[in-house]
Image (cartoon, grey):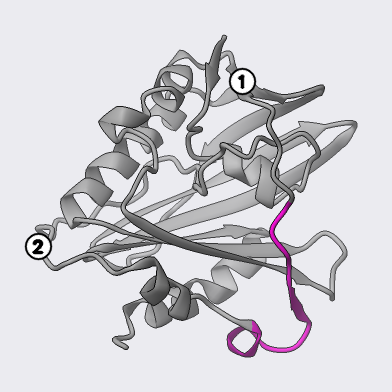
Amino acid sequence: MRRSTSTALGLSAVCTVLALTGCASHAESADSSAPGRRGSSTPSASAPLSSTQLNQRLLNESDLGEGYTRKSEAPRRNDDVTVIGCPALEKLGGDRATGSGLDFAHKAKVSFAYTASTSSEVSEELYSDSATKLSTGISKVFDAMLSCPSYQVASGSTVVDMGTEKSAAPDRGDEQWSQLLTFSAGGQRSVVKQTAIRTGNILVIVSGSPGLVDTHLDKALAKARTAR
């Protein structure tokens, strides 16, 4: 096992999607996706957006429609997250200095609960950096995830069994990835869909209940592209 202070894709889903206790405050906002269809567009060299600009492009309740409530950020914890049974992710998690994880220049995040279902949530993460760094960094993490269809994540006394399954990525943006994540802990099992789209120097990640991700992905992408 290897302790990681910068976790890979999927570990944040343990914290933000399942809201399990004991998640580390060190876990970067991230998405865990096996590689999907990748576009052939050459990354552009436009300047990255600031975190303030990214926040303005996040989805809000009016974008989603009735029945959605914005969730407050989970309290910070000091426990380290440990990856068990996936050497590629263990190595990636501790290799933040190389940019292998989601250590991008600017980021913003928002999460919503859907009141029509007690177990339905959806979250959006926006990152901005050079298109080349976004593409290279996210691809390294996806490749690591693909190498481990099952593993465990431990934080404090909480151990989560995780599984990954490649999902068809929609033909959007310049590059696309998508997968289904299965989380099992404390006798409960949850399935989360995570889809990532790179469009120029912006990376859009939508995670949550599969139906909600499919419903709101295009809205998130359109708003992320909006010039302000």
* Total numbered circles: 2
Q: Residues within 10 Å of mark 1 (few under 14, many from 20)?
A: many
Depth check, front residue: 75 or 44: 75
Residue 60, compared with residue 209, is above or below; it is below
Q: Can residue 52 be found in the magenta stretch?
A: no
What's drawn in magenta, residue-wise?
Answer: 61-74
Horizontally, residue 170 falls left or right of residue 73, namely left
Expressed as whole percent of the image width and height from the top left, the position of residue 58 reads 49, 75
Q: Can residue 65 be found in the magenta stretch?
A: yes
Horizontally, residue 189 falls left or right of residue 203, namely right
Expressed as whole percent of the image width and height from the top left, the position of residue 136 reads 23, 41
Depth check, front residue: 207 or 102: 102
Mark 1 = which residue? 82
Q: Quadrant of the N terminus?
A: top right
Residue 158, compared with residue 52, is above or below; it is above
Mark linked to residue 158: none
Q: Quadrant of residue 161?
A: top right
Mark 2 = which residue? 45
Name the residue located 76 percent from the left edge and 76 percent from the top edge. 69
Name the residue located 44 percent from the left edge and 53 percent from the top edge. 168
Element carrying mark 2:
loop
Q: Quadrant of residue 182?
A: top right
